[in-house]
Amino acid sequence: MSKMQEERQIAQRVTIVGAIWDALLGIAKIIAGWFSQSQALIADGIHSLSDLVTDVFVVVASNNARQAPDKNHPYGHLRFETLTTVILGIVLIIVATGIVLETFNSDRTPFATWYGAAAVILTIVIKEAIFHYTRRAGEKIGSKLLIANAWHSRSDALSSVAVLAGLVGVYFGYPWADKAAAVVVGLLIAKIAIEMIWDNLKELVDTAPDQKTLDQIKDTVDSLKNIMAPHDIRARSMAGKIFLDMHIHVPAHATVSEGHYLSDLVVYTIKKAHPQVQDVMVHVDTDDHIQSDTTDHELVGRPPSLQLPARDQILADLGYMLRSHRNYVDIEKTQLHYLNKTLHIHLIANANKAPSTDLTKVTNSILFDLQNLPYGQDHKVLWLIN
């Protein structure tokens, strides 16, 4: 079973458990509120049933968001969860508005009942338990939607506390306390909804994760040997997962394959230390040269790091200048080292095919022919001896 499939099963199991309790508690409070004429208790019951609606949203979004990447969604489908959370927040604002309006339009006189109080106390206990259960699962799989749904459950518990206070006020002869409690319930729901919408809208526009998290990731990379000065770190969030781009320095004389190995080591170490990181793209710089994405892109012309010619041009020049050495110099295997703003060329030659056993003499002949090369310095000839 893949990690995404496991996370999807956890989200669905936790949400279904919460949905069952939301249905039972919502119905119980609405019935108790109807018989006791308590607007606050009915509002609290509607709040619980709104949890049931959001639970359905969570199940659907979790199922879609944790599908594997495909051709049209190469980064995966996690933004489905982000978008669903925004929709969930809008639904909650509508619910909160309806509760407040109904409270002011109602002329019923509430009275305290033991079954009303029992329904509210039961809600507080169960919804607080569901909050901790759901939040732990959300933190385990890194799901902001699941964590948001957990806080929705806690808002139900908190609103039930307000309803209980209203029932106590009614019991002591203050009927207005019930309306006040209903308004508090609506405001609590609206507050949670606005926070959910704001947090996820920031994610939809690729707002970076908090600086503390980025600093911790940078410290993790700094702890590795032969990998220096991680910089130009860019990150964005998708449903609690972090997608990361960064530059690193490796030793200047590292080969391409070693640079690739070190970049793989960075990716592995980051993901192991920070499970919320879903993907890492690493750009490798040598330790003598910083290639920054923050360079002024409005500058006209090629940047200084690209003033030197590329491999195809260099090999063409070498092929012409070393035409008398083609029998034993393998031009295609030439190693190019772009170091300290200049170019160092390492030629690969076969000693068995050399015109003389005096390789020093042949080397000097090759380097002499390279004197007219208009770029680079300190070139070398590396001999292969079978």
Image (cartoon, rainbow, N blue to C red):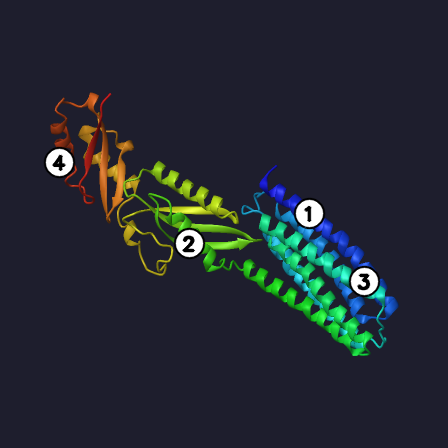
Is 259 positioned to the left or the right of 190 in the image? Answer: left
Of discs 3 and 1, which sits in the foreground?
3
Q: Secondary structure at mark 3?
A: helix
- Which label was assigned to residue 12? 1
Q: Nearer the viewer, residue 94 or 269?
A: 269
> Which residue extends farthest right?
35
Question: Which residue is located at x 53 percent, y 49 percent?
Answer: 276
Q: Residue 373 in the image: x percent, y percent?
A: 18, 41
- Which label was assigned to residue 233? 2
Q: Secondary structure at mark 4?
A: helix
Q: CA distance from mark 2 to mark 3?
A: 54 Å
Q: CA distance from mark 1 to mark 2?
A: 34 Å
Q: Are marks 3 and 4 in contact (CB under 8 Å)?
A: no
Q: Nearer the viewer, residue 353 or 250?
A: 250
Q: CA distance from mark 3 to mark 1?
A: 30 Å
Amino acid at circle 2: Ile
Few, some or many C-alpha atoms within 10 Å of disc 1 (few <14, some 14-19, many ≥20)?
Answer: many
Q: Are marks 2 and 3 in contact (CB under 8 Å)?
A: no
Screen quadrant of the C terminus: top left
- Which label was assigned to residue 118? 3
